[in-house]
Image (tube, helix red, strand yellow):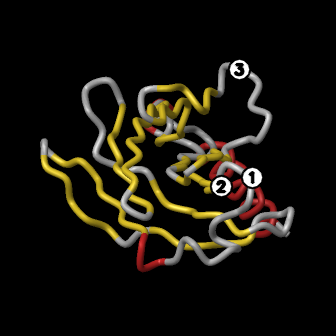
Amino acid sequence: MKKLSFLLLMFSVLSFSSCEDDHEDDIVCCTIYDYEIFILPENADGENLIETGAITTENVKLYYQNDGNWRSSNNFSFIEDSEGQDILRFFASDKLDENDRSETRLVINGVEEFLTTEFNTENGAIITKIWLNEEVVFDTSSENENGNLIEITL
């Protein structure tokens, strides 16, 4: 019985001492990386150009700016959103400048679109603002009717 009491006492002491963390500030919890951008390309009549076949993987080009140079990427795909419509999904460049922004160039059927993406890098990298051809199209500080879906008329 003495042995059991001693073991329980030692276990209790070890349990309490192991709960201390002298390096609490070194721990980063819940790091999130969110680089996804969704594009709904439409014509002037509001038709989805992916669903009509006017846009295919062959006529979409994606480029990331890296040290002043544009680098080609195939980091995009067509997916179906929750409403059943086909959209273009790609990832913004992870090469951030001193203002936590990245530059992405999207070419669809020969039409160039430039996206500047701003990130909150406090606990990872989360998109907070997107400019399409220098016009703000997504901003977490305001109400976004379509969430992170950007509609482009081509």
Q: Earlier in the sequence, mark 3 or mark 2?
A: 2
17 or 35: nearer the viewer: 35
Disc 1 is placed on an element classified as: loop
99 vs 128, left or right, is left
60 or 16: nearer the viewer: 60
Q: Which mark is residue 142?
A: 3
Residue at 79% over, 34% down: 145
In the picture of the structure, the residue carrying the numbered disc 1 is 46
Residue at 57% over, 72% down: 54
In the displayed orientation, state which residue is furthest to the top.
Answer: 141
User: Where in the figure is residue 24, as x and y percent of width and height?
Assistant: 51, 34
User: Residue 109: in sight, yes or no?
Assistant: yes
Disc 3 is placed on an element classified as: loop
7 or 47: nearer the viewer: 47
Which amino acid type corresponds to the residue marked 2 in the rendered image?
Answer: Glu
Q: Which mark is residue 11?
A: none
Does 52 sit above or below residue 19?
below
Task: Give the CA distance from mark 1 to mark 2.
Answer: 5 Å
Task: Give the CA distance from mark 1 to mark 3.
Answer: 25 Å
In the picture of the structure, the residue carrying the numbered disc 2 is 42
Does 131 sit above or below residue 28?
above
